Each structure stands twice: as C-alpha cells, then as structure tokens.
Image (cartoon, rainbow, N blue to C red):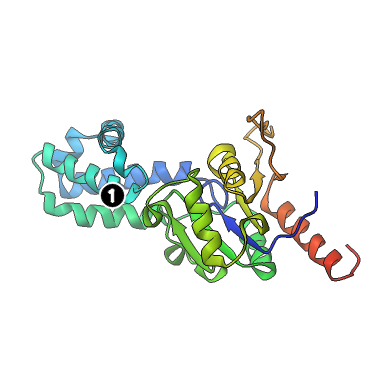
Amino acid sequence: MRFPVRAITLDLDDTLWPFAPIGARIERTLHGWMERHSPATAARFPIEEMRALRDCVVAEHPQHAHDLSLLRRLTIERALRESGGDVALAEAAYAIFFNERNQVEFYPEARDALRRLAARVPLAAVSNGNADLAAIGIAEHFRFQLGAREHGAAKPEPGIFLAACERLGVEPHHVLHVGDHPEMDVAGAQRAGLRGCWIARADAAGRIPRWPIADLQPDLAFSDLTALADWLDAGHARHSGLAA
C-alpha cells in the first residue's frame, strides 16, 4: 500500500529497544542499592515483593496511570516508609532508577533505521513510558518527545496522537504512527485519524506474531524498522520521479 507520509510519530519501548531486559536490570540494581543504603528496605522488599508493591501502588492510584515516573517514586517512598527506612533516600533511589531506565540496548537495525527515517520526514516520539531521549542520546533525530505524563493521558487515548500532530503541524491522515502494540499504538492511532504501522518482530523461535484485532487492519506491517525505512525511501523515490 502506498500513501503520503509527511511525518512519523514513533513509539519507543519494544519498538526501538526491548524493555524486558531494562525492567529486570532496574529491579536488580535498585535492590542492590537498597541493600547498601537501606538494608531494612531490601530485606522487607526483595525484588518480587517490590514488584508486588508497585502493582499495589498502581492499583491504588488509577488517576496517575499515565505517570509512570510518579508511580515509581510513590513505590520507592512507600517501601522506605513501611520498612522503617529514611524516606529522604527516595530521591537518590529514583536517580538510580532513572539512570538504569535510560541504559537501552537497541534492536540491531534500529539506530540506522531511525537515522534514515529522520532524514526523510519529521519524527516525534509518542510514548506511554518514561524513557528520556536526551539521556539515551537520540534526541537529535526527533522534533520533540510527547509522553503520557506530559500530555495527561496515555495511548490509546486519541488526544495524545492528535496533540502530536498539532505540534508537528501536519494533518493526522498524513502522519504515520509506528509501534509494536496492536491496540495502544496501531489501533489507537488509526482511531484518532492517523495511519498505523505495526512493527511485528519475530519471537525467540523466529515466529512472527499474528495481528489480533479482527475489525481493523494496520495500514502497514513490518518485521523491523529497516523494512519501514525501505518503504519510505521507495515512496520518496517514486514521488521524485526516480526509479524505486
């Protein structure tokens, strides 16, 4: 399928890099820090218990579901308080989290594909997560980053997509949103009037996932970002009257 793309909004976690290794490393590093600086907290909340506490905090604060940074801070503060630790340590503990959160390992093709996409059209990051493009070192490729925390609501709520389009100065039907999640990324974007591209990466056994939504199909679906960059390059070549 060919259609004009004048800008791209791009998901981050599990689109540019896998999040699971980051989440596991955050848990290990934060627990090790607690063992050194607040042993009572580490003893009361080992990794599994800290994870359960975070789930509890999330459930107790549905009004903050879009603000993962605040929920993380609340979890750390509560763990310190309930274990008899010094709540003043929360700021330093959060700094440990933030540093680990932004140590990412890109998918093999992602950085080169990101450079290629940014050379063709304006890019904006639209994410429910709390990754920081400047800390990661890729902010130069993006016009801006719009997170659920800053917007006040998370994908798939249409407002976050439309706000990104407004900031880009591009009509929604000329914006392509790219992400890994069928509902939060692709369906959410399409229901807001954008085009949707599904990045459906193969699992460890090499199996490509099947599209799960019966009443809606993605405008595009690729197994990695290189294929998307190739598609975009070919479209620009045709538009320029060059051989694709």
Q: Residues within 10 Å of mark 1 (few under 14, many from 20)?
A: some
Task: In the displayed orientation, state which residue is furthest to the right.
Answer: 243
Q: Nearer the viewer, residue 231 or 19?
A: 231
Q: For this view, does 15 lie left or right of residue 77? A: right
x and y, in percent, of residue 147 in the image = 43, 55
> In terms of secondary structure, where does tag 1 sit?
helix
Q: Nearer the viewer, residue 117 or 48?
A: 117
Q: Residue at x 17, y 50 (%)?
A: 37
Q: Residue at x 69, y 32 (%)?
A: 207
Identify whether 66 is placed above or below 115. Answer: above
* Residue where numbered disc 1 is placed: 70
Q: Amino acid at mark 1?
A: Leu
Q: Residue at x 56, y 37 (%)?
A: 183
Q: Quadrant of residue 75?
A: top left
x and y, in percent, of residue 122 in the image = 61, 67
Q: Residue at x 20, y 39 (%)?
A: 42
Q: For this view, does 143 lie left or right of residue 77? A: right
Q: Is residue 138 visible?
A: no
Identify whether 156 is placed above or below 240. Answer: above
x and y, in percent, of residue 11 in the image = 54, 52
x and y, in percent, of residue 87 in the image = 12, 49
Q: Nearer the viewer, residue 106 or 164?
A: 164
Q: Is residue 193 visible?
A: yes
Which image quarter is the C terminus in?
A: bottom right
